Image (cartoon, helix red, strand yellow):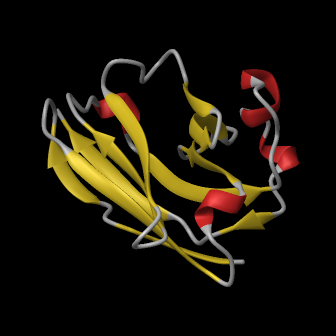
Amino acid sequence: VQLQASGGGLVQAVGSLRLSCAASGRSVGSYTMGWFRQAPGKEREFVAAISWTGTYHADSVKGRFTISRDNAKNTVDLQMNSLKPEDTADYYCAAAGYLGNSRTQSSQSSRYPYWGQGTQVTVSS
């Protein structure tokens, strides 16, 4: 599967952005799909994941970000509201085989063999 992320940009704090990850080659419904982010000088961290059994969100984004899937468009989106400067990072979408109903496994970047290029999100204060 090939993944293409889009939707990043510059936004002021408390604003919103919607990231989209378009998949080609296989249906997004076949995979656990995840969003991760990496800020300058920091390690890549889990943001959210979705599979056919449910969704998971990192505690740092819970209540502000929502991951969703559009099977017709074959995309996985990340709606980001109430953005904070600390959300500034490159955001990556990723795909893995079904990881079960497990938040732990879904949040581990090493379990995702397929990655898209990053899309940059900058939140100004």
In this view of the protein, which residue sits in the foreground, 14 or 28?
28
Residue 30 placement: quadrant: bottom right
Residue at position x 65%, y 34% from top?
Answer: 53
In this view of the protein, which residue sits in the foreground, 75 or 43?
75
Residue at position x 86%, y 46% from top?
Answer: 110
Residue at position x 68%, y 77% from top?
Answer: 26
In-image side of 102 versus 39 (left or right): right
Of all residues, the one furthest to the bottom in this rendering is 25
In this view of the protein, which residue sits in the foreground, 77 or 7?
77
In-image side of 125 versus 120 (left or right): left
Compared with residue 31, is residue 48 higher up or lower down, i.e. above or below? above
In-image side of 38 versus 83 (left or right): right
Compared with residue 56, is residue 118 higher up or lower down, i.e. above or below? below
If the image is split into quadrants, where does the C terminus sit?
A: top left
Q: Position of residue 107 (x, y in %)?
A: 72, 32
Compared with residue 121, is residue 57 higher up or lower down, i.e. above or below? above
Compared with residue 125, is residue 68 higher up or lower down, i.e. above or below? below
Residue at position x 38%, y 29% from top?
Answer: 86
Residue 48 placement: quadrant: top right
If the image is split into quadrants, where does the N terminus sit?
A: bottom right
Q: Position of residue 108 (x, y in %)?
A: 79, 36
Q: Position of residue 50 (x, y in %)?
A: 58, 41
Query: How many numbered discs, if any?
Result: 0
